[in-house]
Each structure stands twice: as structure tokens, then as C-alpha cells.
Amino acid sequence: LPITVRSLSEAMGRPAKAIMSIMFKEFGEMVTINQIIEEETALAVALELGVDLTFKRQKGIEETVNEIIEQEDASEDLITRPPIITVLGHVDHGKTTLVDSLRNSKVVEGEAGGITQHIAAYQVEHNNHKLTFVDTPGHAAFSEMRSRGANVTDMVVLVVAADDGVMPQTAESISHVKASGVPMVVAMNKIDLPEINEQKVLTDLAAQDVLPSEWGGETEVVRVSALNGTGLDNLLETLLLTAELHELKANPNRPAVGVCLEGFRDEGRGSVAWLIVQKGTLRIGDAVVCGKSYGYIRAMYDDRDQQLEEAPPSLPVKVTGLDSVPGAGDHFAVLSDIEQARELAEERRHEGRTDTLARHSGGPRTLDDIMGSVREGEIEDLSLIIKADTPGSLEAIRSEISKFEHPEVRVKILHEGVGGVNESDVYLATASDAIIIAFHVVAEDRAKNLAVQEGVEIRRYSIIYEVVDDIRQSLEGLLRPEL
Ligand code: GDP
């Protein structure tokens, strides 16, 4: 259908002036904001801006599925579900050991056996309450999921080694958790070691704006030894209390929807996927679409490889029956009809996308794009991730930015750190629509590629005042693209 420049701009979430400029550059036409342009042209302009609008026209299955996924349940249908927990922290502080020992200490005697396959998540029981742990510790995985619109984590355990304190990846994790708004419990680990400094850990945390509850703050800090098991019950207790406070609920009586944590190919069983149910109950025989895959659930196993008939909310299960291997972060939904599932999966394959739910419209989110949204009143915050060569530079940039005042926009520093731009920064930027400022540093190669793929802008600077200057100019719509 023909569309005005204004409506196209709204449909894409991009400034009208970007459309006008492409109309001029690519089609040699000067258009006004109220001018009507043809459908073909509109789609082409959108593609130039990195937005594929073709699928937005095809309502139908995709939309139906998104409605199923997002459909709100009546409060009387909701029952309490176990919390889904991810463990984050600096390398070598004991994440893997903690995840393993929680699992081992809580596996019901005699049930364990023959587990050779990788486990993506597991459930434990403590005082008759269940807790689900995601078995891929680390903030990269956490934020990668979030950047894909798959917010499975309800709570985070931040592991901080008592002999080491807050380290760079601890600080990164804290920034990721804050940006996600997910509650966090700190596990002060390795308290069995002789050379520890509990006060330093607490002071370090406070310096990151994570105030321990024993100092009047909101964050519980539990002393544990992942190695010998000290304090693990206490940790589970604290997690259950936190979960209770946040009233995690789901309706078990509806078609299941959730997220794929991981997929792989198994010699005997074909494509296998670890799914975590978020709402509803998943059953053998259900017709499922998961990203670009579809099929009937043929068999279902828990983390001990025991066969299950059904999976309630928050239970991670390994399923077989999908026609191909889905990816981590793909949403799944049970449909009433396998034909619908097949059609949708094939449509997605054809268009080279997994699903549209809670995703970005695609294409780069530049400083200009974000400021355009600010001008149009869609957002009020400009989120920055700042990486610099020295603590002094960071300090100087922070102080310069704090002087920036504007009635329409607040500049928020989501994360700052010394060193090159890494993948974790890019995932954080994607998940939070942030811009990365690289001051006298460059991006690691993998981060650079990821940024291109995810449409994250990395702006390099070597003069401090230019950072704020650019923000101001962009806000006024004056910024010229970097060459
Ligand atoms: P990750 O990199 O955070 O996953 O850390 P790991 O779980 O691999 O642990 C790093 C090292 O710390 C290993 O050698 C562990 O055995 C050791 N470690 C982990 N937890 C504890 C603990 O509570 N006490 C002691 N003494 N060592 C621990």
C-alpha cells in the first residue's frame, strides 16, 4: 500500500529525515513528510535503512504466534513457579564449581546416572521448593539471550571470590544485571581459604553501587564455599526468599511457550533442543514451532535423562522431534496445528530470520537514530557504554558527561571500563539500545564483527569534549555521519 513518509517513519521507528535523505540520494526525489510514496519504493527505502518491512505486511501466522506468546493470563489462573537463575562473575571466582556443586548436592540420591550429555539447565529442590539453574554461567551468554529478546533469567547469583574481590568481569556482570533489572544475590565464594578479605569484597561491591544488606543496602551477600559446600543451603534459602518477594507466577493451563537454551544434533536422536517452559505445559505430541524449526515433541527428558510426559513452567527439558536444530534464544510456541508450525518455520527460513518477537527492527541503532527517537519523544534516555585507555580518561569523560543537561534527554552510563571494546559490551549495547564510546581504544575483532551483525554503533574518540559535543549536535539533528 502507498504510505506517507511520516507513517513509514513511524512504522520503522526511524527519523523521517533519514527517509527523505534516501529518497533524494537513491531516487532523486525531494519529498515532504506528508508526501505519499509507493509501496515498492517504501520497502526499498526501508531496506536501505536496514529494516525489512516485507514480513510486517504478512499478518497471519507470525502475528498469531506472537499473540499466543504474549497473551496475558488472568491472575486467578496463575500459580507460583520456580525461579530461573543464572550465575555470573569473574573468571576463576568459582561459577562452574558453584553450578556443579549445587546440582550434585541436591540431586536426589540414586537418581543420578549415565549423564554424559551436556546439560543446559537443571532443577534442584530445597525445603520442598524448586529452583532452576541455567548451566551456562557468564554474562556473555546472559546478555546474548537478552539481546535476542529472550529474558529467561529471573535472578542472578553474582559470584565474587573472597580472596580477590570485585574484578573487571564482576563489574561487567553488575552492569549487565543492572541494565536487565533482574534481582541479584551475591555469593561471596571461597570462604574456606585462609587469605580472604570479606570487608574488601563488601567495600568493592559498595563502590559499584551494590550496597550489601548488612550495610543497610538491598543486596544479600551470602558466604559460601562452592568447593566444600559451606553456605549453599543458605544461598538457596536467600534465593527462594528473593523469588518469593518477586512473586514469579505462570499459568500452567495453556499452550506452552518458552525459549530454546541450546540445540544440538545427536547421532541417535536427531536434532535435540533444551527448552525452558515459561508459560503453560509442554507435552509429548505437541506441535511446536521454535525459531526456524518445527515438529511434534517426540520425547522429553529432564536433566537426569529421565523420560517425562510433560513439562510445567520453569522446567528445563531436552526434547526430540524437531526437524532441525534451533538456536539459543529462539522462542518456541505450541500451536494447535502442525501445518501452521511448518508454514511459519518455512517462512522464517525463506526470509532468513528466526522470529520477530521482542527483536529490534534490524539495522544499526546509531547515535542519530536514538536521538531521533528522543526528539520524537519515544525515549528519554541515551544509554552509553564507555571504554577508555586509562581510569583517568574514564573519570574525565564521566565528569564531562555529568555536565550535560537537557530537558528532553538523560544520559545514562550503563557500563564503563578500561580496555578495548569486547563482545560483552556489544551484547549489553544490543540488549539495552546503547551506544558504545571507545576513547583511545579499539574494538576487538570479534566485537567489531558482532557490532556490525547486531547493528550496534561503536564511536571512537580521542578528544573528550567531542563526545558531549556529538551528543548535543545529534540531539539537535545536526550530526553528520562519521566517515
Ligand atoms: P569459573 O571460571 O568462575 O567458572 O571458576 P571455576 O569454578 O572454574 O573455579 C576456578 C578455580 O577456583 C578452580 O580451581 C576451583 O576448584 C576453585 N574454587 C572454586 N570454588 C572454590 C571455593 O569455594 N574454595 C576454593 N578454595 N576454591 C574454589
Image (tube, rainbow, N blue to C red):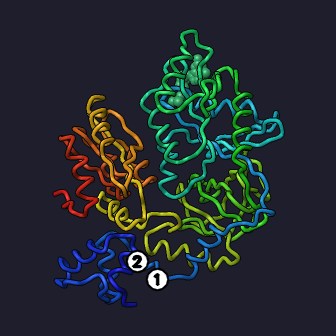
Q: How crowded is mark 1: few (under 14 residues within 10 Å), some or many (20 or more)?
A: few
Q: In which quarter of the image is the N terminus?
A: bottom left
Q: Which amino acid does label 1 sit on?
A: Arg
Q: In which quarter of the image is the C terminus?
A: bottom left
Q: Which amino acid does label 2 sit on?
A: Leu
Report x, y in % for residue 172: 44, 37
Report x, y in % for residue 431: 46, 53
Residue 373 in sight from this viewpoint: yes
Residue shown at the point (40%, 50%) measured from the top left: 429
- 430 vs 351: above or below: above
Residue 195 position by quadrant: top right
Is 32 placed left or right of 346 in the picture?
Answer: left
Circle 2 SS class: loop
Assign ligand 1 to one image quadrant: top right
Circle 1 SS class: helix
Callout 1 touching callout 2 (CB < 8 Å): yes
Of 328 and 89, the residue lying toward us: 89
Give the labeled residue for mark 2.
Answer: 53
Q: Give the label on residue 57, or none.
A: 1
Is 291 placed left or right of 406 in the picture?
Answer: right
Report x, y in % for residue 420: 30, 38
Report x, y in % for residue 176: 48, 43
- 354 vs 219: above or below: below
Q: Residues within 10 Å of mark 2 (few under 14, many from 20)?
A: some
